[in-house]
Amino acid sequence: MVERFDAVDVIRTKRDGGVLSDEQIDWMVDAYTRGVVADEQMSALAMAIFLNGMQRGEIVRWTDAMINSGERLDFSVLGATADKHSTGGVGDKITLPLVPLVAAFGVRVPQLSGRGLGHTGGTLDKMESIPGWRASLSNDEMMTILRDVGGVICAAGSGLAPADKKLYALRDTTATVEAIPLIASSIMSKKIAEGTGALVLDVKTGAGAFMRDEAQARELARTMVDLGTDAGLTTVALLTDMSTPLGLTVGNALEVRESVEVLAGGGPADIIELTVALAREMLAAAGQPDADVEAALADGRAMDVWRRMVAAQGGDPDAPLPVAEHTEVVTAERDGVMESMDAMGIAVAAWRLGAGRARKEDPVDFAAGVELHAKPGDAVKAGQPVLTLHTSEPAKFERAHEALEGGITWAPEGTAPSPRRPIVIDRIA
C-alpha cells in the first residue's frame, strides 16, 4: 500500500509552526492506529503540538479523526440522555451520587469512566470496592441497564476511539500530557463517540487539579465546549475549585461510604453543592430545567436508583465495604484555625497508602486513604484529630507523612477564617 503522506513532512509542518491540513490529520491518526507511523514519530508530532498549539479547525479535525478510528454508540432510542466528565481531582467522588440523582428524573446517564493513575482517583476503582460489582459490560448489557435502571457507570469499551488509547499512553511517557489540544480531543473524542445527547464538563483548577492554572483550565474548558458544540452536542462546562479536597475522604471505599451518605440525605456540604450544581446543568441540557434536584436526594429516589444500579452490575449494595487493618491519627500540634490544606499533599499521601497506582496494571488497596476531620476555616484544639490515615500495610505510613509535611497551614486561635473560594468559579457555554 502506498501511503498518501510521509510522517516526517507532517511533523516538520507542525514543528515550524504551520497548520496541518485535514488530509494530513486524517492520515496521521489513521496511520498511527494502523502501526504505519511509529511511536517515536507520533511522539515528535505530539511535542510539536505541545510547543506550537493547534488552531480550532485543526483540533476539530483531529477529534473527528480520533472518533473515526473506532465505533460510535447511539443512545437516542432511550430518549433524553446526559453525561458528565470531570478532569479529575482529590476526593472527587461526584459521579457516584450524580448518576443516580439525574437518572431519578428519567434522564438516562451512560457514564463511561476510567481508573485512577497518579494522584487522581478513578471512578471504576471506587465502584470496584463494592463486593461483586463489575466494570466491564458489553454494549447490549449497557443498553439494557440504561433502559431498565436509568444509569450506568462502566468502563469504556475497546472500540471507542482506539487511536486515543494508543496516543494517551504515548503522551504519558513523553511529557506531552498537558497539551491542551490533545487533552481536549482525547476527552471529547470519547464523549462524542459515546453518543450521549448532552454533556456537562467539570473542569477543575487549583493545587489538586490536573490544570492548576486557572487561565489554562479556562482555555481547556472553552476548547472542549467548542468541540462539543461543533459536533452538535449540547455542551456546558463548570470551572470548579480544587485547591482543597472535596468532601472528607480520599480513597476508594472511604469515598463510596461518603457518596452513600449524600444519597441518604446527608454528607459534606461541598459534595452536595457540586453534585446539585452538575445535576441541574445535566437536567437542563436534557430538557428539565425546573427539576427539584434537592428533593430527589431528600426523599430517597436517588438512593433507590443507586441500589438498583449497583445490583444490576453484580454488586451488593448492602455488603460491608473494605476497612483498613491499620489506621494512624494525625493531630493538631497547637490551638488555631486551619488556613489551608494542600489537596495535592493529601492526594499523594492517599496514593502512598495504597489508594492509587503508579502504572495502569498496578492493584489498589480499596480500604486505603485519608479521612479529614477538619478543613480550612475550622478551629481546632491541640491534640484534636485532623486526619486519619488508612492502609493495609503499616510500613506505608512513613512516606504518607512525608507527603503531608507543610501541607496544612494554621492561623492563631480566634483568627477569622478567610472567605471560602466558591466551588463553582464560572460557567462556560
Image (cartoon, grey):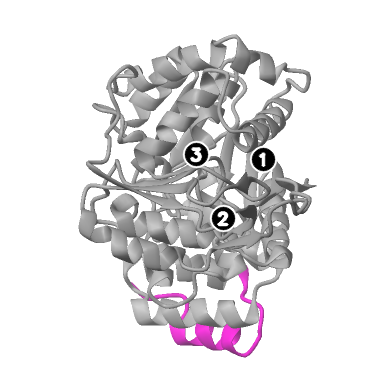
Side of 424 where 84 appears, left or right: left
* Crowd rating for badge 1 (residues with CA inside 10 Å; few <14, some 14–19, many 20+): some
Say if the magenta span includes residue 181: no
**Mark 1: secondary structure:** loop
Q: With 97 as the anchor, is 394 left or right in this view? A: left
**Residue at x-position 55% and y-position 11%:** 301
Residue closer to the observer: 91 or 1: 91
Q: Earlier in the sequence, mark 3 or mark 1?
A: 3
| Residue type at tag 3 | Lys
Q: Position of residue 289 (x, y in %)?
A: 77, 23
Q: Alpha carbon of mark 2 to alpha carbon of mark 1: how far?
A: 13 Å
Residue beneath disc 3:
93
Mark earlier in primary sequence (3, 2): 2
Q: Residue at x 41, y 20 (%)?
A: 309
Residue 403 shows in this picture? yes
The residue sitting at 45% across, 54% down in the picture is 120
- Which residue is the site of mark 2? 64
Q: Nearer the viewer, mark 3 or mark 2?
A: 3
> Of helix, strand and loop, which one carries label 2?
helix
Between 7 and 323, the one nearer to me in the picture: 323
Instruction: Give me the C-alpha separation between circle 3 and circle 2.
Output: 30 Å
| Viewer can see residue 74 | no
Residue type, numbered disc 1: Leu
Magenta-highlighted residues: 1-22
**Residue under numbered circle 1:** 233
Q: Is residue 181 above or below residue 94?
A: below
Q: What amino acid type should be assigned to the residue bearing mark 2?
A: Asp
